[in-house]
């Protein structure tokens, strides 16, 4: 058997729907398919990657909100940024390093409301007239009210606080602290020697 005939029989065994007599037409189809794959596949990375700017077919707006303190520096604490269109909520995000990004589908008038612990709530109105990107700076003022709880200590309901105190009392006595002065979460004091 000649080499080309042996190749046709192997090809016919791989493609059971192709009889051995049509071996050369099947081989040409296979080569055409491979050529199509080589030509088309390299062009697929040129397609849209789905970025924020093109996510909504040119109609969306990416609103970047920067929250700053009275000195003009971005705040380091977490803040909640809410976006309203009139009275209807249009989005909400938490900040990361003083920045938050929100995406809306249409242009128009919006209100940005920012809340953060230790600062007064701030709001800013903005008008967006074109799709794409928009940037907004919101300045927060430090709250003049004293904090209601000591930072770092858990705020518990009275029943939970009582149960915690009763459960921790034997441990405090064993560690040498008095149950009245120690707080849950305090570091144990060393025993006198």
Image (tube, grey):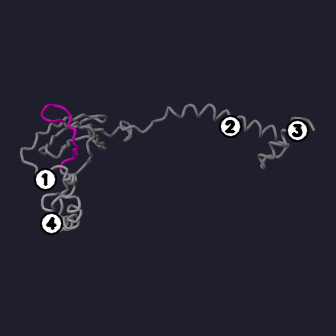
Tell me the CA gap for discs 2 and 1. Answer: 71 Å
Residue situated in front as seen by the camera: 191 or 110: 191
Mark 4 or 2: in front is 4
Figure check: 180 above or below 78: below
Q: Earlier in the sequence, mark 4 or mark 2?
A: 2
Please name the residue that numbered disc 3 is placed on.
5
Residue 127, percent from left and from top: 20, 38
User: Which mark is on residue 33?
Assistant: 2
Q: Earlier in the sequence, mark 3 or mark 2?
A: 3
How packed mark 1 is, by other alpha carbons closer than 10 Å (few <14, some 14-19, many 20 or more), is few
Please name the residue that numbered disc 4 is placed on.
158
Q: Earlier in the sequence, mark 3 or mark 1?
A: 3
Tell me the CA gap for discs 1 and 4. Answer: 14 Å
- The stretch of residues the image draws in magenta is 68-86
Tell me the CA gap for discs 4 and 3. Answer: 91 Å
User: Which image quadrant: the N terminus?
Assistant: top right
User: Is 84 colored magenta in this rendering?
Assistant: yes
Asked whether, in this view, residue 30 is left or right of residue 187, the answer is right
Q: Quadrant of residue 96?
A: top left
User: Is 169 colored magenta in this rendering?
Assistant: no
Q: Earlier in the sequence, mark 4 or mark 3?
A: 3
Tell me the CA gap for discs 3 and 2. Answer: 22 Å
Q: Earlier in the sequence, mark 1 or mark 4?
A: 1
Asked whether, in this view, residue 14 is left or right of residue 84, the answer is right
Please name the residue that numbered disc 1 is placed on.
149
Asked whether, in this view, residue 88 is left or right of residue 58, the answer is left
Residue situated in front as seen by the camera: 126 or 180: 180
Residue 30, percent from left and from top: 73, 38
SS label for mark 3:
helix
Q: Quadrant of residue 78?
A: top left
Residue situated in front as seen by the camera: 183 or 47: 183
């Amino acid at each position: 058997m000649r080499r080309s005939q042996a190749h046709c029989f192997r090809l016919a065994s791989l493609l059971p729907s192709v009889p051995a007599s049509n071996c050369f037409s099947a081989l040409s189809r296979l080569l055409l398919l491979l050529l199509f794959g080589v030509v088309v596949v390299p062009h697929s990375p040129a397609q849209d990657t789905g970025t924020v700017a093109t996510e909504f077919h040119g109609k969306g707006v990416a609103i970047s909100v920067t929250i700053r303190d009275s000195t003009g520096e971005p705040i380091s604490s977490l803040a909640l940024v809410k976006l309203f269109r009139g009275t209807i909520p249009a989005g909400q995000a938490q900040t990361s390093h003083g920045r938050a990004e929100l995406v809306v589908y249409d242009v128009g008038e919006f209100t940005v409301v920012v809340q953060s612990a230790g600062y007064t709530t701030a709001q800013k109105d903005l008008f967006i007239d074109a799709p794409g990107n928009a940037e907004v700076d919101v300045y927060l003022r430090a709250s003049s009210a004293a904090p209601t709880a000591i930072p770092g200590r858990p705020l518990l309901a009275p029943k939970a606080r009582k149960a915690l105190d009763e459960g921790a009392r034997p441990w405090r006595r064993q560690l040498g602290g008095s149950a009245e002065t120690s707080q849950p979460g305090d570091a144990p004091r060393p025993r006198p020697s």
